[in-house]
Image (cartoon, rainbow, N blue to C red):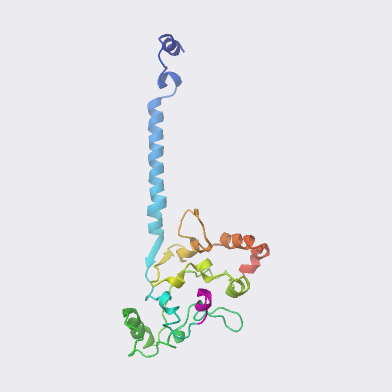
Amino acid sequence: MKNQSNSAGNGTQPSIGDLVPKWINLNFVVQDISFFVLGLIVALIVGWAIFPALLYSKQPQPMNFNHALHLNSEIVDGIEGDTPEEKCQSCHWFRDDGSFSGIPKLDMCTGCHDDPESPLGETPEEKAFLVNYVEPEKQVPWFVYSKQPDCVYFSHIAHVKMGEFACATCHGDFATNEKLPLYVENRLTGYSQNIWGKNISGFYLNKTYADRMKMDDCARCHTEKGQEQNNACFVCHK
């Protein structure tokens, strides 16, 4: 108080030291704040950059598949429909019982690519496909971006036919892809990053349903579409 009175009497502004109680050591406070900020920066670097790099493994698909080319009905025979969704179902079709065929098996591909000695195009991908898979009649071991845990039941026909969802709503715009993206797998869970989300924090500025496929995303969609009853546990967990 004496120092403050002297400062006021001299017509000068009090210093920070005059305003802080004498029992507080400013050097220690500054030091503690510096250590806290430094630790926070290190933690953010580890949590947002180093940890994700270690958590996920990246690997290419066994071979590339050009979706854009195969959805061009002027080039590929058997592709029917006017919309991308209708064209997708030329290869990703529904069985008579309503179940979804998923990723096509080799016999679907050999409907066109049946002769290893006569490729339909000139791409090295097709030649490798004919030699490595068609000739030995070996299934392509595709990595499934959207594979859910075994405890999850998902009905494609309920969403595509009844709900009239576009494929791109959940899977993103694969229809225009000329090159398949890398398969990014969570080392701990064994599931694709497409399930857990590309943003490890879970926060998105403009979130879409294709950003991730976790349970709360499904529940949010059900609620927004007025189908809250489908948030019951037994609907998706059989």
Frontmost residue, 73 versus 34: 73
Quarter of the figure with residue 26:
top left
Q: Is residue 93 visible?
A: yes
Q: Position of residue 106 (x, y in %)?
A: 44, 84
Residue at left offset 47%, top offset 81%: 104
Left or right placement of residue 110 versus residue 226 in this view:
left
Left or right placement of residue 97 versus residue 65 in this view:
right
Which residue extends farthest top? 9
Left or right placement of residue 16 versus residue 236 in this view:
left
**232 in the magenta segment:** no
**81 in the magenta segment:** yes
Q: Position of residue 198 (x, y in %)?
A: 45, 59
Frontmost residue, 26 versus 19: 19
Frontmost residue, 137 versus 161: 161
Q: Is residue 174 above or below residue 79?
A: above
Which residue extends farthest right? 229
Q: Position of residue 51 (x, y in %)?
A: 40, 54
Residue at left offset 60%, top offset 80%: 98
Frontmost residue, 107 versus 69: 69
Q: Position of residue 157 (x, y in %)?
A: 60, 75
Residue at left offset 66%, top offset 62%: 228
Q: Is residue 144 visible?
A: no
Q: Is residue 72 above or below residue 136?
A: above
Q: Range of the magenta residues?
A: 80-87
